[in-house]
Image: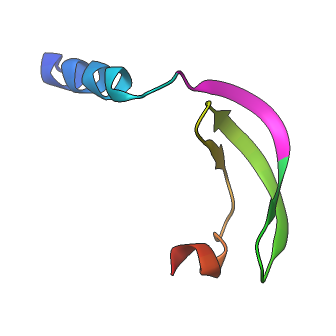
Amino acid sequence: MSLYDARKGAAQLERRRSARFTVDLEALFRSIAHERTGPLANISEQSAKVMMDPPPRDVLQ
């Protein structure tokens, strides 16, 4: 990793409003058209990252 990459990564971390925490949990995603489960990768006070392959289509539109 170059010094530039390290600084860029540090700047991206500092830009976040709250800390993100890695978790190993199963999540339930519900929308009007879908109900699916997937692993919850990380979570913060404002959001969470649920891994789904492929992602629900109604979220992408």
Q: Residue at x 67, y 53 (%)?
A: 51
State whether residue 30 appears in this view. yes
50 versus 12 height, above or below: below
Q: Residue at x 37, y 23 (%)?
A: 13
Q: Residue at x 62, y 80 (%)?
A: 58
Judge by depth and name the residue closer to the eye, 19 or 56: 19
Residue 8 figure quarter: top left
Question: Percent from the top left, x then y, of residue 31?
Answer: 76, 73
Question: Percent from the top left, x then y, of residue 12?
Answer: 31, 29
40 versus 24 height, above or below: below
Number of dots carrying numbers: 0
Residue 39 is left or right of residue 44, and the answer is: right
Residue 18 is left or right of residue 8, and the answer is: right
Judge by depth and name the residue closer to the eye, 2 or 38: 38
Question: Percent from the top left, x then y, of residue 23?
Answer: 73, 29
- For the stretch drawn in magenta, the main secondary structure is strand
Residue 25 lies in magenta, yes or no?
A: yes
Q: Quadrant of the N terminus?
A: top left
Residue 16 lies in magenta, yes or no?
A: no
State whether residue 1 appears in this view. no
Judge by depth and name the residue closer to the eye, 1 or 15: 15
The magenta segment is: 19-26
Q: Residue at x 57, y 26 (%)?
A: 20
Colour treatment of the image: rainbow
Question: Percent from the top left, x then y, of residue 3?
Answer: 15, 16
